[in-house]
Amino acid sequence: MHLLLHFRNLTGLNNLSMAGGVAHNSKLIYEVINSKLFDRVFVHPASADNGLPIGSALLCHNENCNDNFKLKNVYIGNNIGISDDIKSVLDQWKDHLKYNLSDEASHEAAQLLNKGMVIGWVQGRSEYGPRALGNRSILADPRPKENKNRVNSIIKMREGFRPFAPSVLKEEMENYFEVPNCQFDYRFMSSVLKVKPKWRNTLGAVTHIDGTARLQTVDKLDNPKYWSLIKHFFSLSGVPIVLNTSFNNIHEPIVDTIFDAIQCFMTNRLDALVIDNYVIFKKQEWHSAGEFNLSIAKHIVITEEDGVKALFNSYSDKRKVISNSLDGILRYRRVHMNTVNSSLKNELMKLWSERYITLQPFVQ
């Protein structure tokens, strides 16, 4: 803040653009936009080195075109594909999943959230940058305070203090949050704002201990399907907000492909998954039967020391001791769940959830 004050006085400039890792500190950004030093503040949604390609493209565009291009969204990653592509992958899991194609996927998802379920939500192109902005997200009801611990412990598999973001309909933002006069784009989840006191207890799962929340505004023009989900949830719950966090667990980056989404869904305790217009549930005891192909991640090596077999992670230098029975399965690269005992089954599932191995249904 001292530096910003110095250069604000030195230059007389009223507009500020921020990038670099420091710009991902959402509490700092709130201090900047609330300081009254600037009329407008912009934070690029991919402010670290991964933002350099977009920055270069924008610079080149603005030097050669005269249309004042403004970055409105970052849904420019890989596309989840057309309905037939999704169905072909889901059909490989038909012995383990039940799914249906819905004309009202957004409405059904909102109903699931209002019933207390936690869902995976995968749509269109993935987001560019570190924030899940409604295309590769885990969603939950933002009201019950216990949802924070629930999502952290049984789904994200991480520390309980980690916070979650509220995704709010853009047109409802000022009814729930104290918004400074400074012009700022909240659609990229770059800053916290103070939750209005009367809503802090209501929004128990997304309000920080200091009364703030790192919000994302959702515009109907930018993401009509996600906007529609929140709008339906608003009509059911009276709150135009959902809890949003990135779709992954602590052992992996944000999911990208259809298989990534299914793998994460199968190895945590999400209640449902929505991919495009497919609403998906796990079959009861899905992991107790069926034949799976098994693969080991490229950075994982099977080692043996003093007769003890382990999986060595070359990225983290961690060793995971494995049973002799599992060693045989790892080398054969196929397992039939009907033929293994519960202890070995649990070991397989644990390794899969930590991404040492990958299981896929065997398809002839």
Image (cartoon, helix red, strand yellow):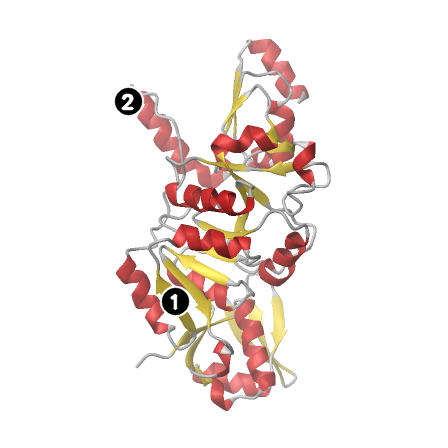
Residue 164 placed where, x, y %? Answer: 60, 46
Residue 82 placed where, x, y %? Answer: 28, 56
Report if residue 360 is visible in the image.
yes
How would you rate the neighbour count of disc 2 (Cα within 10 Å): few for under 14, some for 14-19, many for 20 or more? few
How would you rate the neighbour count of disc 1 (Cα within 10 Å): few for under 14, some for 14-19, many for 20 or more? some
| Residue in front for this viewpoint, 358 or 223 | 223
Q: What residue type is labelled 2?
A: Asn
Q: Residue 64 carries which label?
A: 2
Residue 37 placed where, x, y %? Answer: 61, 16
Q: What residue type is labelled 1?
A: Tyr
Quarter of the image with the N terminus in it: top right
Q: Residue at x 61, y 31 (%)?
A: 177
Residue 268 quadrant: bottom right
Q: Residue at x 53, y 54 (%)?
A: 113
Q: Distance between the residues labelled 1 and 2?
A: 49 Å
Q: Mark 1 points at which residue?
A: 99
Residue 336 quadrant: bottom left
SS of the residue at dot 1? strand
